[in-house]
Amino acid sequence: MKIFWACVALLALIATIGCNQGNGPAQPIAPPAPVTFDAASFPPLPPPRPVAPGIVVHEAMLGSAQIWVYLPANVATPASLPCVFVAPAGTPLIYGMNLGDGDRREQLPYVPAGFAVVAYSISGGVPDNHTGAQGLAGVRAFKDAEGGLTDARRAIDFTLARVPAVDPKRLYTAGHSSAGTLSLLVAENEPRVAACVAYAPCSDVRRRLGDRIIRPLEGVMPDFGAFIDRTAPINGAARLRCPLFLFHAQDDKNVSISESIAFVNEVRKTNPNVTFVQAQRGGHYNSMIQEGIPKAIQWLKALPGGG
């Protein structure tokens, strides 16, 4: 409900601005060139602190971007660890989100299994009780970051420059719900990613948002609809060529499993290396915690050169 009322406040602000009716439908535009980062400009990895038994975290800030690097407490060998990149879940798919302590439940389980984990914030995060103006600024920042794709690339660049324990040939992306949407988007567009994990993702973002949200935003950002279509995973399914593990519960009331079935069918047209696991129960969140993550870890470790 908090996300619903946040969207209501944002749309109320847009109504006061007024829609630009003269532009007509947003026209598709070419995606911007991938943003590259100067590794020499990255700060050193901050000192670690214990976060769980046998696990330390380095919490870095790159401007306003958060990057949390989780490692086994005693790791030392260079290029010895596969690495899972994960963003925070729970966005309405129109603005971003900062990392918080509640995200750690989805981040920590990979580390005891032999993985490094890099969690990263998504551009356009807004306060919980944000104003419409803050929400609109978040939408612009989220769009400018290609729905979080730029943030993922920054996290990968930082990791390869500052975390020598990570093996650059074993970079994996993972995420739940809206972060699963981003995980699919990253896998479709980032060739350094060797495998993708998504738990109950929204793959058809236009259908999820609907005209009630997209059209008012097009009124103040004429290319917003084109951005949604460009970054919706369903429209880039043919580009997802790395191994894919997709998990979804049949009783999910948030995102219908039928959406994942349709997405998997699209990916399989060009990529046979797809594992689709359907849980009978557990809903949108608990199924991922109790069944999805453990099975994804097993799947990642079984990949050639995996964990």
Image (spheres, rainbow, N blue to C red):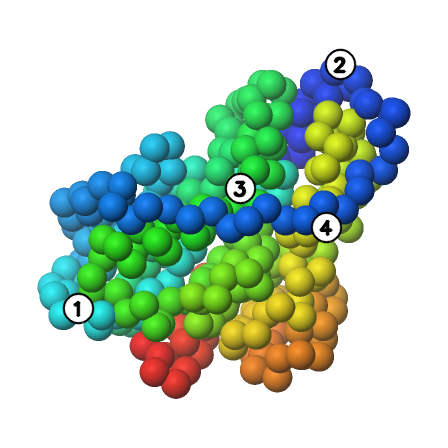
Q: Earlier in the sequence, mark 2 or mark 3?
A: 2
Task: Kindly indicate the quadrant of the structure image that contains residue 236.
Answer: bottom right
Q: Earlier in the sequence, mark 4 or mark 2?
A: 2
Badge 1: few (under 14), some or many (20 or more) residues near its Cα, within 10 Å?
Answer: few
Proximity of marks 2 and 3: CB atoms separated by less than 8 Å? no
Q: Which mark is residue 229?
A: 4
- Figure quadrant of the N terminus: top right
How far is disc 1 from disc 4 in space, using C-alphas?
A: 40 Å
Residue tagged by mark 2?
16
Proximity of marks 2 and 1: CB atoms separated by less than 8 Å? no
The kind of residue on which mark 3 rests is: Ala
Residue 110 seen in this snapshot: no
Residue tagged by mark 1?
78
How far is disc 4 from disc 2 in space, using C-alphas?
A: 26 Å
Q: Which mark is residue 145?
A: 3
Badge 4: few (under 14), some or many (20 or more) residues near its Cα, within 10 Å?
Answer: some
The kind of residue on which mark 1 rests is: Pro
Kind of element beneath mark 2: helix
The kind of residue on which mark 2 rests is: Thr
The kind of residue on which mark 4 rests is: Asp
